[in-house]
Structures are given as C-alpha cells and as structure tokens.
Amino acid sequence: QVQLEELGGGLVQPGGSLRLSCVASGSIFSINGMGWYRQAPGKEQRELVATIPSGGPTNYADSVKGRFTISRDNAENTVYLQMNSLKPEDTAVYYCNARAVLLDYRYLEVWGQGTLVTVSS
C-alpha cells in the first residue's frame, strides 16, 4: 500500500511562516495528484488548501492565494506547502492527500495522519 508522512507543523506567531512536507512511500508506480487539506477546530469538514497535479496548474483556496505555495518533487514523491503571512484563522490540522497508482496499476487515494498548525501570539 501507500503511506504518507507529514512533517513541519507547529506553533507560529501571526505573520510568520511554516513549511509542511509530505512524503509518500510504499508500492507506488506513480502519483497523479497531491494536495493539502485542513480541518479547523470545531469544524466537521476538511477544506481544500491547495492541490498540484502531476502536470498542469496548481489550485488554491481563495483564502490562501498569495500567501501559500504548493510544490512537489516527483522523484522523491514529496509535496510541500510553504505558508507565509500566517493568520490565526489558518489554525487547523493539515492533511496531505495523494492519488496514487500502485505497482499493480490499481488507483488508491491516501490521506496522511495530519499535522497541527497553530497560529497564535
């Protein structure tokens, strides 16, 4: 199968920056799309933050445009989220998502365990 390991969460002051990373490992033939979602405290649903396909344009939530940048290293099966000018409302558990093709050519959507980002003074 496929596992996602997220790194980089933590506590940061408003206006600060954090960089999240997510590494995919396992029986991977290729990864089509990768992305980041978040779930804020007290909210039931995860919301899209940013996605990046294997080829094509990136996509961002309006709330993070101009502040967050998603990128990926296909050779390392890794996706990054550079978060700048962080606001308290960015506080959430951030989840990595990957849509992978396995070695047996099955498709699999995988989620990471989540990493907490807290923006507070």
Image: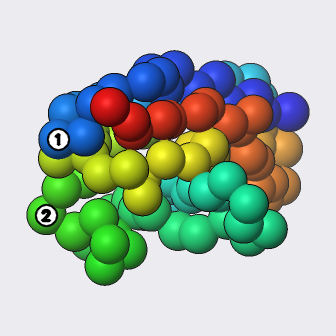
Q: Position of residue 38 (x, y in %)?
A: 58, 55
Label 2 with label 1: CB-CB less than 8 Å: no
Side (left or right) of 87 relative to 93: left
Residue farthest front in this picture: 121
In percent of the image, x 72 and y 66: which residue is there? 43
Q: Residue furthest bottom?
A: 62
Circle 1: element type: loop
| Amino acid type of the residue that numbered disc 2 sits on in the rendered structure | Gly
Q: Secondary structure at mark 2?
A: loop
**In which quadrant of the rendered view does residue 19 lie?**
top left
**Residue at x 73% of width, y 46% of height:** 111
Give the quarter of the figure containing the N terminus.
Answer: top right
Kind of residue at badge 1: Gly
Residue 107 found in image quarter: bottom right
Disc 1 marks which residue?
15
Q: Give left or right: position of 26 versus 16.
A: right
At which x and y percent is residue 50? 41, 62
Q: Is residue 91 above or below residue 2?
A: below
Residue 4 image offset from top left, x and y in percent: 67, 31
Depth order, front residue of 48/51:
48
The circle on residue 108 is: none
Where 61 sits versus 103, above or below?
below
Residue sitting at 25 percent across and 40 percent down? 14
Disc 2: which residue: 66
Q: Residue 71: in sight, yes or no? A: no
- Give the side of residue 50 with respect to residue 40, left or right: left
